[in-house]
Image (cartoon, helix red, strand yellow):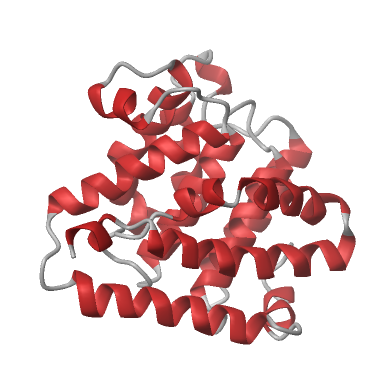
Amino acid sequence: MSPDPLSRLASLEGVPSAYAAARDGIDALLRDRGLRRTSPETTAESLLLGAHASGVLEGSVSTLEEVRSGSCDEVAQDAVRVSTELLGLAPTLSRTPLQALARIHVLAAADLPEPQRGRPRDASAAQRLRGVGELLTGSADVPALLVAAVVHAELATAAAFASHNGIVARAAERLVLVARGVDEKSLTVPEAGHLALRPAYESNLRGYAEGGAAGVHAWLLYAAEAYAAGAEASPVRRAG
């Protein structure tokens, strides 16, 4: 998908109001309950919650307590490994997004043979990744939340890497929110929003891949709801 369609997507029925409401909710959380009391520990907790949720969506059966203690299964360990380096990739995502996406996959897929880590599966997959890179270097006038939603869906449905595409997609989504100033301290937990809405998450991803324009529209409306749920899952709310 080239950058041009995003302006059209941003004007689809219900999308402007849904994304404005989601952004307002995130801004209210960060302004009213977050900024005066946030700490690196709060960000670390948000990343841990996100790693657990992303791992579960990828097939992990580990509990949050097991993830916290380091006794989790391999899939959860993969998601945690991504989370530990993710925020440092925000400048790279803005400048050279394909490099950032490759690094996320390298972190997630540490057990794969080296030639399969951080590289697209084939020429078609490389083309899809280039399209995602174009989205990430353009679309300045499109709401950042919408860019994050499309990047997530493109990465998840293209399955451009040999494995861990869901973990990469959800990590990239969080990173877009950081890099584009929606949630610079990464205090919301979009992965937990998707987990809370798991049946809708999975069905709308299928719709995005297979349902044409209607499927894309439905995904965008779903994603706005998921971002609101991700704000509700923020550790800032518990601190408050």
The residue under the point 46% across, 29% down is: 108
Residue 6, x across and y down, in percent = 68, 75
Q: Is residue 33 left or right of residue 126?
A: left
Quick check: can you spot residue 14?
yes
Q: Quadrant of residue 36?
A: bottom left
Q: Quadrant of residue 215?
A: bottom right
Quick check: can you spot residue 94?
no
Q: Is residue 230 left or right of residue 128?
A: left
Q: Quarter of the image containing the C terminus? A: bottom left
The residue under the point 60% across, 57% down is: 151
The residue under the point 24% across, 79% down is: 31
Residue 209, x across and y down, in percent = 80, 50
| Nearest to the observer: residue 50 or residue 110 | 50
Residue 218, x across and y down, in percent = 76, 66
| Nearest to the observer: residue 214 or residue 240 | 240
Residue 81, x across and y down, in percent = 35, 30
| Nearest to the observer: residue 106 or residue 80 | 80
Q: Quarter of the image containing the N terminus? A: bottom right
The residue under the point 71% across, 49% down is: 128
Q: Is residue 32 left or right of residue 133?
A: left
Above or below: residue 226 compared with residue 145: above
Q: Is residue 54 left or right of residue 11?
A: left
